[in-house]
């Protein structure tokens, strides 16, 4: 059953003539037909178009015109990513008929690499939330529990579920406070949060133009690196992508971690984590020590969870700028959990917003000083495993260990590092400074290859 194979394995099988794009696409469409009525990962499925693209990929590859390692492989896109002429709702019932005026740069790059879009995946409305719930468009079902609907994590909920259930081998999410890493963590696979500007956001519906970062969600770290290689790079229409140093992560991916210096989180931050999460985290630290890394605890300038308000002021202000008129209209069907989050920015004076941006840069500098000499900071990605949807407190957030990375403009990889007694995934977060994606992926890959947590699949969709 190749549907649970990595992109790298699928690519090798296509190159070796053992699989054809049409066979691969048909298998994933079949799984969507079998499982998505319950799991509710997809907003729209482009079955006919995907079959046509796969047939064209068959012909091109047979003719010796393979454009790269991802040619003919499927992918799912979060329903924030515009594709010209198609509906992009941003998770909002208000936008059920919103037609995309153009195609997002990242989608153009995926198609240019030969990838085939299977469809669009569910998101929290306006991408404003970490649980993955959506009152009007529906909440995706975490496949690790067949009987109880548990949170998928958000806001890239459908992307997380589509990969975990092998309805797609990979997907695109966006991360403003943890929205790639949280669903990857709760659903038991890999998510890469990139640095600001590394992947263009042009054509992706914005929540926070200051902080938004699209990123890959995959079965393995190598797959995330493959997608990142295609997605990264400057675009002349987006100034913040210009002037950065772009690095191909593939040449250094398998160098290991011997001699690298890795920081563990302070005791104060451990207190918010469940015992099973801490047990998996501590075992992960020992794995790195066994691989030759130097693991040491570092004092940090703030408790990680205490930085949520600083980030929230920026997201709330940006978010209100983009969708405030919709949220203010009480006649519109806006998710009642999302409305107050956007309203954070409603009455914020310009001076407070400017102060929030200044605070962000100060905090970023303080973290850089505290972690000087370290190659990465290791934390759990989530403080507890996925809870039932009916236990969600919408006034709370699961992003207690992810938001600080966005605030300090870092990059991070979330990857599986264990399971609870109930069989739910736990996750490790590898955090690096901005523009250090290659290092973060290298460190994550070393752990992944030394363990087997990423190889498990949910029984309900096996």
Image (cartoon, rainbow, N blue to C red):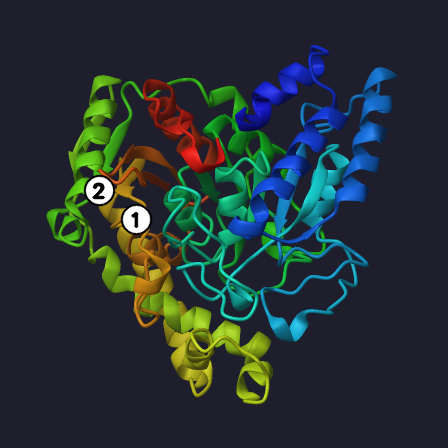
Q: Position of residue 304 (x, y in %)?
A: 24, 56
In the depicted structure, whether residue 195 falls above or below residue 392: above
**Residue 311 at x, y = what percent?**
37, 65
Q: Secondary structure at mark 2?
A: helix
Residue 329, compared with residue 118, is above or below; it is below
Percent x, y for residue 308? 31, 64
356 lies above or below 224? below
Alpha carbon distance from label 1 to label 2: 8 Å
Residue 36 falls left or right of residue 186: right
- The single residue placed furthest to the front in the displayed view is 147
Decide if residue 110 is on the left or right side of residue 8: right
Q: Nearer the viewer, residue 48 or 346?
A: 48
Q: Position of residue 426 (x, y in %)?
A: 30, 40
Which residue, given by chain and number where applicable, does mark 1 sit on? 382
Q: Which residue is mark 2?
A: 277
Residue visible at 79% across and 36% down in the picture: 51
Answer few, some or many: residues within 10 Å of disc 1's Cα (few below 14, many 20 plus, some between 14 and 19).
Answer: many
Counting residues from the start of the chain, the first of labels 1 and 2 encountered is 2
Residue in front for this viewpoint, 230 or 38: 38
Query: Which residue is painted at 51% across and 38% down in the image?
Result: 165
* Residue 254 occupies quadrant: top left
- Can you see residue 248? no
Where 267 falls versus 403 (above or below)?
above
Residue drawn at x 38%, y 58% is 407
Residues tagged 1 and 2 counted as in contact (Cβ below 8 A) = yes
Secondary structure beneath disc 1?
loop
Q: The N terminus is located in which quarter?
A: top right
């Amino acid at each position: 059953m190749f549907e649970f194979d990595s992109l790298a394995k699928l690519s090798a099988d296509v190159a070796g003539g053992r699989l054809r794009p049409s066979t691969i696409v048909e298998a994933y469409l079949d799984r969507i037909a079998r499982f998505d009525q319950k799991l509710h990962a997809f907003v729209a499925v482009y079955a006919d178009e995907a079959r046509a693209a796969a047939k064209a990929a068959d012909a091109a590859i047979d003719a010796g015109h393979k454009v790269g390692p991802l040619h003919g492989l499927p992918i799912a896109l979060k329903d924030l990513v515009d594709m010209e002429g198609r509906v992009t709702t941003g998770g909002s019932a208000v936008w059920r008929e919103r037609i995309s005026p153009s195609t997002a740069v990242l989608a153009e790059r995926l198609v240019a690499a030969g990838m085939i879009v299977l469809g669009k995946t569910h998101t929290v409305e306006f991408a404003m939330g970490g649980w993955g719930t959506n009152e009007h468009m529906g909440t995706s079902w975490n496949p690790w529990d067949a009987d109880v609907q548990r949170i998928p994590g958000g806001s890239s909920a459908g992307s997380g579920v589509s990969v975990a259930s092998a309805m797609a081998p990979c997907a695109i999410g966006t991360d403003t406070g943890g929205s790639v890493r949280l669903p990857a963590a709760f659903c038991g696979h890999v998510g890469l949060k990139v640095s600001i500007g590394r992947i263009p956001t042009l054509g992706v519906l914005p929540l926070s133009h200051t902080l938004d970062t699209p990123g890959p969600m995959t079965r393995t770290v190598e797959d995330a690196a493959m997608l990142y290689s295609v997605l990264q790079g400057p675009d002349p229409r987006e100034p913040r992508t210009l002037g950065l140093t772009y690095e191909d992560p593939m040449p250094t991916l398998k160098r290991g971690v011997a001699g690298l210096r890795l920081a563990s989180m302070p005791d104060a931050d451990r207190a918010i984590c469940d015992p099973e999460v801490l047990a998996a985290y501590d075992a992960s630290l020992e794995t790195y020590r066994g691989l030759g890394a130097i693991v040491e605890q570092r004092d940090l300038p703030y408790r990680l969870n205490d930085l949520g308000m600083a980030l929230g002021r920026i997201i709330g202000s940006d978010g209100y700028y983009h969708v405030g008129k919709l949220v203010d209209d009480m006649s519109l069907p806006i998710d009642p959990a999302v409305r107050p989050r956007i309203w954070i920015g409603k009455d914020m004076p310009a001076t407070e917003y400017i102060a929030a941006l200044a605070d962000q840069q100060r905090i970023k500098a303080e973290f850089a000083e505290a972690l000087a000499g370290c190659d990465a900071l290791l934390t759990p990605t989530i403080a507890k495993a996925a809870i039932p949807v009916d236990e969600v407190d919408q006034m709370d957030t699961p992003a207690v260990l992810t938001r600080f990375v966005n605030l300090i403009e870092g990059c991070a990889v979330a990857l599986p590092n264990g399971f609870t007694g109930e069989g739910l995934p736990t996750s490790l977060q590898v955090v690096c400074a901005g523009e250090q994606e290659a290092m973060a992926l290298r460190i994550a890959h070393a752990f992944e290859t030394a363990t087997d947590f990423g190889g498990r699949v949910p029984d309900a969709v096996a």
